[in-house]
Amino acid sequence: MNRKLLTIAAAAFATAAAIGVATLTTAETDSAADAPAEATVPAEKQMTIWRDPNCGCCDAYADYMEENGYHVTRIDDPDFDKRSIEAGVPEQGLGCHLAQVDGYYVSGLVPAEIVERLTTERPEITGITLPGMPMNAPGMAGKSGTLKTYAFSGDDITVFSDE
């Protein structure tokens, strides 16, 4: 009787262990398939955005950048403006959020093609900014018309693009 009980217990334990291993292996495979590994996304396509958690245009902008091939990490930060100034964004040039991509800071709703130009040309600057929340910028009504983006580095502020 004890031998029979021991055999049943051993069989139950082996079955539970097999189910556990199969579940763990499947879970690891599924989660790896769901999210792109940051290591496989080139640095110039990885973007971190610090944003006010109550700003809908920042989410629309992040969605827009993802549609343009970027892997966007969103971080709620109600003090993103202080972080922006610490990063070197001129106070008069603050955008509605701060992003970092490939070693540069990007402040505001800068169009994807301007961000791509920044990471391709690699100028010796800290970053670029599109001040305020222009209605014709990505994340607002959508890119239309001309947007003036500024480059900043230390005390130097110059026009980066006017397109």
Image (cartoon, rainbow, N blue to C red):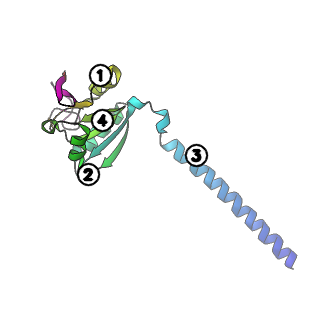
- In three-dimensional space, the C-alpha distance between marks 4 and 2, rounded to whole angstroms, equals 17 Å
Q: What element carries label 4?
A: helix
- Image quarter in which the C terminus is found: top left
Up/down of 103 relative to 53, above or below: above
Per the image, the residue denoted by label 2 is: 53
Residue 6, quarter of the rendered image: bottom right
The image position of residue 72, as x and y in percent, is 36, 39
Mark found first going from the N terminus, 3 or 1: 3
Q: Do the residues labelled 3 and 1 touch (CB within 8 Å)?
A: no
Q: Which amino acid does label 3 sit on?
A: Thr
Q: In front here: 99 or 111?
A: 99
Confirm whether the magenta stretch covers residue 157. yes
Q: What residue type is labelled 1?
A: Pro
Mark found first going from the N terminus, 1 or 4: 4
Q: Do the residues labelled 4 and 2 touch (CB within 8 Å)?
A: no
Q: What element carries label 2?
A: loop
Q: What stretch is highlighted in magenta?
A: 136-159
Question: Crowding at label 2, few (<14), some or many (≥20) Cα neighbours within 10 Å?
Answer: few
Q: Residue furthest front?
A: 154
Residue appearing at x 22%, y 48% in the figure: 55
Q: What residue type is labelled 4?
A: Tyr
Residue 74, quarter of the rendered image: top left
Per the image, the residue denoted by label 1 is: 123
The image position of residue 106, as x and y in percent, is 26, 34
The image position of residue 54, as x and y in percent, is 22, 52
Q: Which amino acid does label 2 sit on?
A: Pro
Mark found first going from the N terminus, 3 or 4: 3
- In three-dimensional space, the C-alpha distance between marks 3 and 4, rounded to whole angstroms, equals 28 Å
